[in-house]
Amino acid sequence: MLTGSVTFCESDVNINHAAFTNNLCEDGLNIVHAKFTLDNSLIANTFSDGFDADFCEGTVNNITFRDTGNDGMDLSGSVITIANLQVYNAGDKGLSVGEKAEVHLLSGTIIGANTGVASKDLSLLKIEDLNLENCIKGFTAYQKKPEYGKGNIIVKKYSATDVKHLFLLDKGSVLDLMGEKHTGEI
C-alpha cells in the first residue's frame, strides 16, 4: 500500500523546483529504499507528514514545509544531509529521525511545532545551526520501538525563542548542546 501522494519505491530520483501541496494522504512525498536529491521545493498543506523517507540515502537543499498535519520531515533508517530547511507550523515535529537514521542538518529554521527536532531509536542527529521559534519542545531524544535503543543529538549552534521546554530526554538518550552533555534520567 502506498502512503504518499507521490511515492518513489526502490527508484532513485532527483527532484528540483517541485511543489507538493494540498494532499489528503498520509505523506505529501514518500521515498522508500532509494537514493535521492530534493532541492528548491515546497511541501505544504498536508494531512499528515510532509516528507517521509524510509531507508534512503540522500540530500535535501532549500526545502520549505508549511502547515503539515504531523511532521515536516520524517526520516527513518536513512542517511541524509539537509541544508537550508524551513518548517512553518508542523502539527507534531519539524524534523523527526528514527530507526537508526544518521541525519546531518547543516542549517535550518523551525517555527511553530509541537517539537522542533526529535531523534529516536538509535538515531544520530547532528545539527550545525538551527533556529527554533514558537515550539513547545525544542530537542527530544528517546526510544520508541523496543527493538532499537535511545536517541542521540549533537548541536553545534542554535537559537531558541518562545520554546517552552528546551529539551526532553528519556533515560539513556543523549543531547550534546554546544558542548554541554545532557543524559536523560527519567
Image (cartoon, helix red, strand yellow):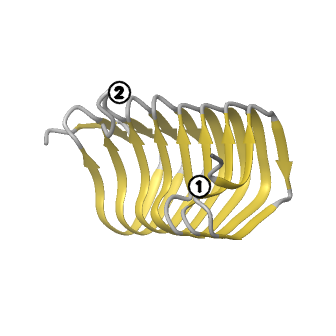
| Residue position marked by numbered label 1 in the rendering | 108
Label annotation for residue 14: none
Question: Looking at the image, which residue is at 35% across and 35% down?
Answer: 151
Query: Badge 1 local density, few (<14 within 10 Å), some, or many (20+)?
Result: many
Closer to the chain start, of discs 2 and 1, is 1
- Image position of 16 with respect to 105: above or below: below
Q: Nearer the viewer, residue 75 or 168?
A: 75
Find residue 159 and report its horizontal and vertical position in percent: 45, 59
Q: Please, which residue is most extreme toward the left here?
A: 186
Query: In the image, is residue 151 above or below residue 116?
Result: above
Amino acid of disc 2: Tyr
Q: Quadrant of the C terminus?
A: top left
Residue 19 x/y as whole percent: 79, 64
Q: Are marks 2 and 1 in contact (CB under 8 Å)?
A: no
- From the viewer's perspective, is the residue at label 2 or at label 1 nearer? 2
The image quarter containing residue 99 is top left
Name the image quarter holding residue 5. Answer: bottom right
Residue at 51% in and 58% down? 71
In the image as oriented, which residue stretches furthest toward the front? Answer: 1
Q: Is residue 116 visible?
A: yes
x 71%, y 35%: residue = 58
- Badge 2 crowding class, 10 Å Cα cut-off, few under 14, some 14 to 19, many 20 or more, is some
Q: Amino acid at mark 1?
A: Gly
Name the secondary structure under disc 2.
loop
25 versus 149 height, above or below: below
Q: Is residue 6 left or right of residue 110?
A: right
Q: Which residue is more in the foreground, 148 or 134?
A: 148
Q: Position of residue 109 (x, y in %)?
A: 56, 61
Q: What label sits on residue 148 in the rendered view?
A: 2
